[in-house]
């Protein structure tokens, strides 16, 4: 089956290169040997809906419809055919919008919703959405650490554990100590730290990030999503799409994550379409594919899907 997939994708690559017929040679497509690749961080939304969307902003190049078919056109060239969607919208009913979309899209194998554990109605909303097998947990971001000692927050986190759901956390290095505290309080909660813990540009990572990631990496049920590498660079912040494309540039982050989390707790995520702030889907994939393929077949397979399955426990 791998040979057939390699042949088909290689044929597609040749066709695309021929169609491009320019002086610039088409970028080679990296295809890992892992028999399955799951992208655990995509965002789907549609600003053309009558109600619009709360994110992204209208003046952003990201303000356009993004659907599974759009993602698949980019990801399938690399053998990526399944995804876990992470909801960025704070609108309650946008959780249902993704669940309805997933019912028609076999490529979506998991969904991380957007609910706030500290809110009074959290339990009611969690009960509603967790009835869908595709619903695998929630994402929290922003100032969530300030609610750590809130009774409602603690009860909400307990409900996640009781329902065998996980928690994605998004933020900068300043939130990592709270991740440690949360995991120590609730050791049976599966936590996924998004976007390499907000490391930032590889040439400017701080000792705070390094030391905090070491603490987080020692925790049993805490995983790290290797995502958002390109869009965190200074070059991408200065000019869209201009992030460095060479693996060497990202080694300070990748090597540290590998050293502190090991092969059993690192997870692949593209952060598409947000990754396009730094470069293309292919750009970000080439970097991680090159890095993890050098770690051996076992580690590569764990990174591209097995570790994610342990974290999200999607229903096969």
Image (cartoon, rainbow, N blue to C red):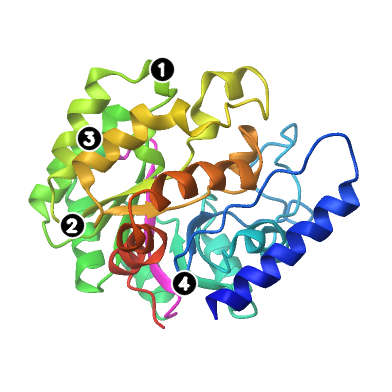
- The residue pinned by badge 3 equals 213
Q: Give the label, 2 or 1, closer to the camera.
A: 1
- Give 226 or 117, whichever is nearer the viewer: 226
Q: Earlier in the sequence, mark 2 or mark 3?
A: 3
Q: Secondary structure at mark 4?
A: loop
Snapshot quadrant of residue 165:
bottom left
- Give 309 or 155, whichever is nearer the viewer: 309
Residue 100 seen: no
Q: Residue at x 38, y 31 (%)?
A: 251
Q: Quadrant of the N terminus?
A: bottom right
Q: Earlier in the sequence, mark 4 or mark 2?
A: 4
Q: Residue at x 48, y 34 (%)?
A: 247
- The residue pinned by badge 1 equals 203
Q: Give the label, 4 or 2, closer to the camera.
A: 4
Mark 1: give few (<14), some (14-19) or many (20+) Cα within 10 Å.
Answer: few
Instruction: Give the magenta range.
Output: 132-144
- The residue pinned by badge 4 equals 35
- The residue pinned by badge 2 equals 221
Label 4 to label 2: alpha-carbon separation: 25 Å
Q: Secondary structure at mark 2?
A: loop
- Residue 278 position, x and y percent, is 61, 32
> With respect to residue 242, does 117 lie above or below?
below
Mark 2: give few (<14), some (14-19) or many (20+) Cα within 10 Å.
Answer: some
Callout count:
4
Label 2 to label 3: alpha-carbon separation: 14 Å
Q: Quadrant of the C terminus?
A: bottom left
Apparent side of residue 7 relative to residue 25 in the rendered image (left or right): left
- Residue 267 position, x and y percent, is 37, 54
Q: Give the label, 3 or 1, closer to the camera.
A: 1
Label 2 to label 1: alpha-carbon separation: 29 Å
Q: Give the label, 4 or 1, closer to the camera.
A: 4
């Amino acid at each position: 089956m791998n040979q057939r997939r390699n042949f088909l994708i290689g044929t597609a690559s040749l066709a695309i290169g021929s169609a491009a017929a320019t002086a610039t040679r088409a970028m080679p497509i990296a295809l890992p040997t892992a028999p399955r690749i799951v992208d655990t961080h995509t965002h789907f939304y549609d600003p053309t809906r009558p109600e619009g969307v709360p994110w992204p902003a209208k003046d952003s190049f990201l303000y356009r419809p993004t659907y599974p078919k759009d993602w698949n056109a980019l990801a399938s060239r690399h053998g990526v055919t399944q995804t876990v969607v992470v909801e960025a919208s704070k609108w309650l009913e946008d959780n249902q919008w993704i669940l309805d979309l997933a019912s028609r899209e076999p490529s979506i194998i998991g969904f991380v919703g957007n609910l706030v554990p500290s809110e009074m109605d959290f339990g009611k909303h969690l009960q509603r959405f967790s009835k869908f097998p595709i619903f695998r947990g929630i994402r929290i971001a922003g100032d969530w650490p300030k609610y750590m000692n809130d009774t409602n927050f603690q009860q909400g986190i307990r409900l996640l554990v009781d329902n065998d759901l996980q928690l994605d956390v998004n933020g900068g290095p300043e939130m990592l100590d709270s991740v440690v505290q949360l995991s120590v309080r609730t050791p049976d909660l599966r936590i996924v730290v998004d976007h390499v813990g907000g490391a930032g540009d590889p040439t400017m990572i701080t000792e705070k990030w390094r030391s905090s990631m070491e603490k987080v990496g020692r925790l049993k049920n805490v995983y790290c999503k290797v995502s958002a590498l390109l869009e965190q660079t200074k070059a991408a912040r200065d000019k869209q799409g201009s992030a460095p494309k060479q693996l060497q540039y990202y080694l300070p982050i990748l090597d540290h994550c590998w050293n502190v989390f090991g092969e059993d707790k690192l997870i692949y995520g593209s952060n598409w379409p947000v990754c396009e702030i730094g470069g293309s889907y292919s750009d970000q994939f080439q970097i991680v594919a090159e890095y993890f393929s050098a770690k051996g077949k076992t580690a590569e397979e764990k990174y591209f899907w097995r570790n994610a399955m342990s974290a999200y426990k999607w229903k096969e």
